[in-house]
Image (cartoon, rainbow, N blue to C red):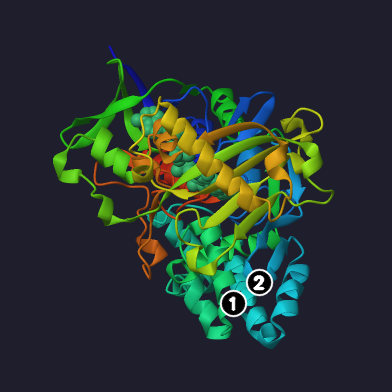
Amino acid sequence: MAETVDVIVIGAGIGGLTAAALLQERGLSTIVYEKNSFPGGSCSSFSKGGYRFDAGASVFYGFCDEDARGTLNLHARIFRKLGIPVLTIPDPVQIHYHMPAGFDVPVHYDRNRFLECLYGRFPHEREGIRRFYDELESVYDILSSLPAGSLEDLFHLAAVGGRHPIKAVALGVKTLFSMGGTARRYIHDQELLRFIDLESYSWAVQDALSTPLVNAGICLADRHHGGINYPVGGSGAIPEALVKGIEKFGGSVRFKSEVEQVIMEEGAAKGVRLRGGEEVRARAVVSNATVWDTFNRIVDDPRLKVPDERFVKAPSWFQIYLGVDGSVIPEGFDMHHIIVDDWTKYDQYGGTIYFSAPTVLDPSLAPSGKHALHIFVTAETWQWDKFDRHGEEYKRAKEEYARSIIARVEKILPGLQDCVELMVTATPQTHVRYLNRRDGSYGPLLKPGQNVLLKPQNRTPVKNLYAAGDSTFPGQGVIAVTYSGVSCASYVARQLGRPLDYL
Ligand SMILES: Cc1cc2nc3c(=O)[nH]c(=O)nc-3n(C[C@H](O)[C@H](O)[C@H](O)COP(=O)(O)OP(=O)(O)OC[C@H]3O[C@@H](n4cnc5c(N)ncnc54)[C@H](O)[C@@H]3O)c2cc1C
């Protein structure tokens, strides 16, 4: 007879692992199936030539342990609940922006220091800058005082509405506004508005007009409160700690186990069939795959297919991982940088360069005297389709494109090209292969102007099938998918008769 558990989670990304850890800790038996041999998906680490690289994410919110309030220190609260410590190093600068015409802004943890940089370049916009960033603070103040839970759970909504009626209404009103629309109420300088677009693009891959004010209230305000903290040992330390938490309470994460199909009976999810044919049954199934991959690949019901165009499909990435001689990184160099050479191209493929040097904070990630660097730009699978993945031409094209980007990074690191000792590249095709993500996409985005509450929540059209991860509210980013994992676990736990306590 097939094994039966309370909950099966498809995928060990941060969204899936978070949901699994909280459900298992609550006593609901949970198995996570992950196609790779490691956890974390877009937030994982890999080793090569003595270096430990972050495969994707490296700017982390939610680790501040001092402030016991609210939803914004979710990682700290979850790991405290699981009893699994994750050591982190505070990052004093969230991102150092390098833009055309010598416009250079390090986003300091110290909010006043950051604002002084903007006042220095835009003295005529001093009042507008203050009011715009104060508006983000007011969103932060609300979010940091409300508990995390499912917006589909009437008990949660009643509890929040009952205890914090004014804040709940105020937050509802704020969901009607975009980050860019709010900025334009206070600010008129075009160069400054471009910077605000870039602030949004840096995590949302959309301009500020397309980005909800509420999301901006987390990303652009909490960096000055809870701050940005980097896990010792690299980004993979986060999913590894979640796996430990799941196992500590009796659950399991099964690697190299790809789910081929959700077993459906009478319109309800009843379990999964793995590649190889094994079937496992469950009372609830949570998919951590994207909405496209869930409904076009593993749920076999033509009526539920999700066409690409139902959402805005974010681009994928071309990524470069470098091992370099340490002499190229000057003393006091910041960990994260974003480089834009031309404002007319910042939102085109390759127009914005994302750069991180995690060894600035954690030297253990590289051999002594060396640094591990991660550089990436937006890209699409169709740009690389013409190549045979095993052919020389593909290798040459990747190397040439990588070299052209490294040359542009010389703007902030002169001499970089001559210091490269190891280079690994990854195209959108690599992203598809490792993460099972439709076209390697960063995920589905809201349409410009769409209310953030219209983002899919954790329930799906299939009974007993739920979703966690960046296809669901609130969206992309490690802290966002952690929220989605928390809200999914809260909803599922209540359905299965064991409601979670608030974190
Ligand atoms: C290059 C890059 C840089 C980023 N930088 C940052 C950053 O600095 N800060 C930040 O907060 N966010 C960043 N992000 C975004 C963040 O990493 C993601 O939004 C988040 O990690 C997505 O998590 P997830 O749980 O939705 O899914 P994923 O990470 O996609 O994980 C899903 C998992 O499910 C597995 N899976 C899928 N289908 C199946 C199946 N059928 N069977 C078994 N397993 C399956 C996949 O193998 C994968 O492991 C970055 C992302 C990228 C790509």
Residue 107, picture quadrant: bottom right
| Amino acid tagged 1 | Glu
Sooner in the amino-acid sequence: mark 1 or mark 2:
2
Q: Residues within 10 Å of mark 2 (few under 14, many from 20)?
A: few
Instruction: Read off the residue under disc 2.
Output: 101
Residue 13 is situated, as x and y percent measured from the top left of the image, at: 48, 36
Residue name at image x 72 percent, y 62 percent: 106
- Asked whether disc 1 touches disc 2, contact meaning CB atoms under 8 Å apart, the reply is yes
Residue 147 is situated, as x and y percent measured from the top left of the image, at: 55, 56
Residue 450, picture quadrant: bottom left
Check the image and name the residue furthest to the right. 331
Viewed as shown, does residue 311 lie left or right of 442?
A: left
Check the image and name the residue furthest to the top. 1
Residue name at image x 34 percent, y 44 percent: 382
* Ligand 1 within 8 Å, label 2 CB: no
Residue 270 is situated, as x and y percent measured from the top left of the image, at: 26, 29
Residue 279 vs 369, above or below: the answer is: above
Check disc 2 and report its element: helix, strand or loop: helix
Instruction: Read off the residue under disc 1.
Output: 191
Res. 56 visible in picture: no
Q: CA distance from mark 1 to mark 2?
A: 10 Å
Number of the label disc, if any, that sits on residue 55? none
Residue 251 is situated, as x and y percent measured from the top left of the image, at: 49, 24
* Ligand 1 within 8 Å, label 1 CB: no
Q: Residues within 10 Å of mark 1 (few under 14, many from 20)?
A: some
| Amino acid tagged 2 | Ala
